[in-house]
Image: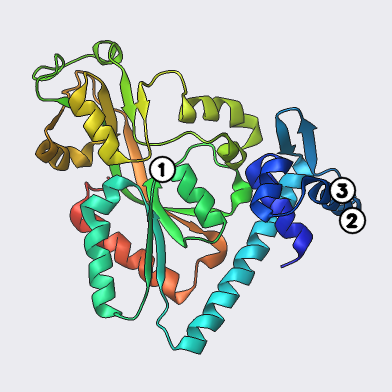
Amino acid sequence: MDKLLSQFLAVADAGTLSGAATALLITQPTLTINMRKLEEHIGAPLFERSSRGVTLTRYGETLYENARLMQRLYDNTLTAIIDQQHGAERGLAIGSGYSWWNMFLRDLIVRYQGEFPRAPVQVSLGNQLRLMDQMLSGDISMFLAHEIDGLSPNLGTDFVPLTRVYNAFFVHAGHPLAGAPRTQAEIDRYPRVISSLAESRHDRFFDPSRRRTRVETVFDRTHFAFRSNSLAACVDYTLATDAVLIHTHVMRDIFAADGLVEIIQRQDPRPAIAGLYVLKDRRGEDRIEDLIDRISHAAKATLPPLQ
């Protein structure tokens, strides 16, 4: 892939020239010169520069999405050639939230490797925006997550709905909120625990017209006491304090084994759709469609119905 485009992607991802230069193992002046060369070649400004770093212009956004597509095609081609050279079965690279891994994906992976013992498997666990970043970068082919509101249509993603769930609140067994129905106001009096990390660079995934509203909702930096990308750490913290862990309700039995109980909500919880994100340009590939079918059947057998 073209060197300048690769460097452009690194700058866009890092949000700063210095951070990208460090990741690329080149000097910042060299990278600055190369980005100006790329802007001259494109004939449009790609970055808005400030003391905090760089953000993409609308021309930069267009180049970013298409350059990502070019990189994915190039990387996928190299991977296919390597597989052919080594006679390996096509591997599996998938992302998932913690709930879906525990509920059914772990068993599906074991069955998959039993059927294709030579196929390497890569599973990335984490929050949905980090998984989106990995899918757009070509590190994973799809991921399981809640449906993300306000995504930019330029991302080129397809969402396959699988189940209807809701966010539940979990506390240790002796917590003052346990054992009786509670209003949202009562729950809100206690600090929150969230099993994801906010990363401002993911702001670019959202439609610009809704970006500020969506980011404040998704990242919400002010209303939590503890946040970690480790679910085990979140459970440990919740057991040791009076904080309230927010997580998908399908985990209640697994959390119960750890000593957490679900708070009974007085109001009906707001439902949410969870499903599978995949790139539109990969729909129709036999291996991708086969995996979507396998996941859909496993989810239907394990998770609450979509309707």
Tag of residue 270: none
Return the residue nearer the eye: 271 or 65.
65
When the figure is inspected, residue 12 is found, relative to residue 73, above or below; the finding is above
Q: Residue at x 87, y 48 (%)?
A: 36
Image quadrant where residue 46 sits: top right
Name the amino acid, label 1.
Asn
* Residues packed near mark 1 inside 10 Å, few (<14), some (14 to 19) or many (20 plus): many
Q: Residue at x 41, y 73 (%)?
A: 91
Measured Cα–Cα span from mark 2 to mark 3: 9 Å
Look at the image and tell me whether residue 184 can be seen.
yes
When the figure is inspected, residue 84 is found, relative to residue 177, above or below; the finding is below
Name the amino acid, label 2.
His
**Looking at the rendering, in which quadrant would you find the N terminus?**
bottom right
Q: Which residue is drawn at 64% across and 49% down?
A: 154
Which residue was labeled with disc 2? Answer: 41
Q: Do the residues labelled 1 and 3 touch (CB within 8 Å)?
A: no
Percent across and percent down for residue 185 are 28, 11
When the figure is inspected, residue 284 is found, relative to residue 66, above or below; the finding is below
Return the residue nearer the eye: 7 or 28.
28
* Residues packed near mark 2 inside 10 Å, few (<14), some (14 to 19) or many (20 plus): few
Percent across and percent down for residue 62 are 73, 49
Name the amino acid, label 3.
Arg
- Disc with the residue nearer the chain's start (2 vs 3): 3
Which residue was labeled with disc 1? Answer: 127
Which residue was labeled with disc 3? Answer: 36
Percent across and percent down for residue 280 are 54, 60
Left-right relation of 248 to 43? left
